[in-house]
Structures are given as C-alpha cells and as structure tokens.
Image (spheres, rainbow, N blue to C red):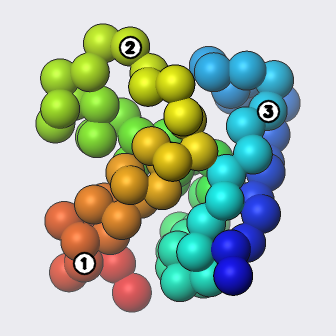
Amino acid sequence: MHEHWQEQSPEEPDPFSDSVEVLLSPQQFEWLTKQCEFLRIPKQQLVGDAMEEWLCRYQMRVMPRDVSATIRVAIDEFIRRHREEFL
C-alpha cells in the first residue's frame, strides 16, 4: 500500500511542474510527516533537501523522467544517510 502525497507551497514554486504526485510507502510517509512536524517545516522542503542531496551525490544535471520514483529513492537514501540526525 502506498500513500499519495502532494503538497504545494506558494512561497516556493515546484521547479518540476505545478504539482508532482509522489507515491510514498507508508513508512516513508510516516517518517516524512514526523520529521516535518518536529522541524516545523513543510514536507516539500524536506523532500527538496533529499532531492538536492541525491542529485548532487549522483551528479545529475537533469531530473530523471520518473520524478515520483526518483523522489522515493532519494528519500530512502536520505533516511539511511541521516538516520542519526532525525527522530
């Protein structure tokens, strides 16, 4: 079962499109929700941080075609790499 998550922020336009639907696993969605509540930041910001790190790590200059799948992978890696920094 996957959670559908979509969030837009008026102060930070989505660089990929007007909106991106991301299918997260229940564990990813729970982690993202918990961290964002604790940090008091929008989910879009934390997902953006994960994507920025992922794109830099893999020296990506262009966003892959399947944005949703890429975000899921980036979030998984972000969670693993920063496990000790978060709840």
Q: Secondary structure at mark 2?
A: loop
Which quadrant, please, contains the N terminus? Answer: bottom right
The residue under the point 68% across, 26% down is: 14
Q: Is residue 9 visible?
A: no
The residue under the point 20% across, 81% down is: 84
In this view, the residue in front, 32 or 76, is 76
Left or right: residue 16 versus residue 4 is: left
The residue under the point 36% across, 34% down is: 52
Circle 1 crowding by C-alpha within 10 Å: few under 14, some 14–19, many from 20? few
Amino acid type at circle 3 is Ser
Q: Secondary structure at mark 1?
A: helix
Image coords of residue 82 (percent x, y): 23, 68
3D distance between C-alphas at marks 3 and 1: 28 Å
Q: Nearer the viewer, mark 3 or mark 1?
A: 3
Mark identifier at residue 83: 1
Amino acid type at circle 1 is Arg
Q: Which residue is mark 3?
A: 19
Image coords of residue 85 (percent x, y): 25, 75
Q: Secondary structure at mark 3?
A: loop
**Quadrant in which residue 21 is drawn:** top right
Which quadrant, please, contains the C terminus? Answer: bottom left
Q: Which residue is mark 2?
A: 62
Q: Is residue 60 above or below residue 71?
A: above
Q: Is residue 58 visible?
A: yes
Image coords of residue 53 (percent x, y): 28, 40
